[in-house]
């Protein structure tokens, strides 16, 4: 969905408007974790990325590249677990 420029811009805008420093954020259905990692760069103190698919494994590298790996926890599981 982030590949769609209209949706992607809307999602990023919503995260920017919603996340405040110190918040705890859960990105359920995180995929590669782009939105959750963005929340961490905006100051979220802890971000949980939940995704059953292997795409979430990319999130670890993205979090490290963005300097927020210490605040991002990747959980490969269904949101129902």
Image (cartoon, rainbow, N blue to C red):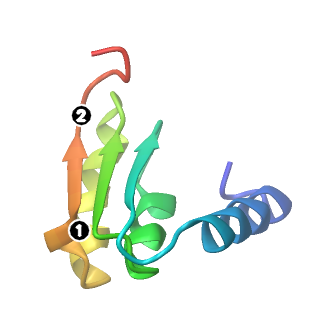
Q: Quadrant of residue 72?
A: bottom left
Q: Residue at x 14, y 72 (%)?
A: 70
Q: Is residue 16 left or right of residue 46?
A: right
Rendering coords of residue 15 (x, y %) = 61, 65
Image quadrant for the C terminus?
top left
Q: Residue at x 46, y 69 (%)?
A: 39
Q: How far is the residue under mark 2 from the one under mark 1? A: 15 Å
Residue 69 in the image: above or below residue 59: below
Rendering coords of residue 77 (x, y %) = 26, 26
Residue where numbered disc 1 is placed: 61
Rendering coords of residue 43 (x, y %) = 39, 79
Q: Quadrant of residue 64?
A: bottom left
- Please identify, in this view, whether the residue under mark 2 or under mark 1 is nearer the observer: 2
Q: Quadrant of residue 69?
A: bottom left
Q: Residues within 10 Å of mark 2 (few under 14, many from 20)?
A: some
The residue tagged with tag 1: helix, strand or loop?
A: helix
The residue tagged with tag 2: helix, strand or loop?
A: loop
**In the image, which disc is placed on residue 76?**
2
Q: Residue at x 30, y 49 (%)?
A: 48
Rendering coords of residue 20 (x, y %) = 50, 73
**In the image, which disc is placed on residue 9?**
none
């Amino acid at each position: 969905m982030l590949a769609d420029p209209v949706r992607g811009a809307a999602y990023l805008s919503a995260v920017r408007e919603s996340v405040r420093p110190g918040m705890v954020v859960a990105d359920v259905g995180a995929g590669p974790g782009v939105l959750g990692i963005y929340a961490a760069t905006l100051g979220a103190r802890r971000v949980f990325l939940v995704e059953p698919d292997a795409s979430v494994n990319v999130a670890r590298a993205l979090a490290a590249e963005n300097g927020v790996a210490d605040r991002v926890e990747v959980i490969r599981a269904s949101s129902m677990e």
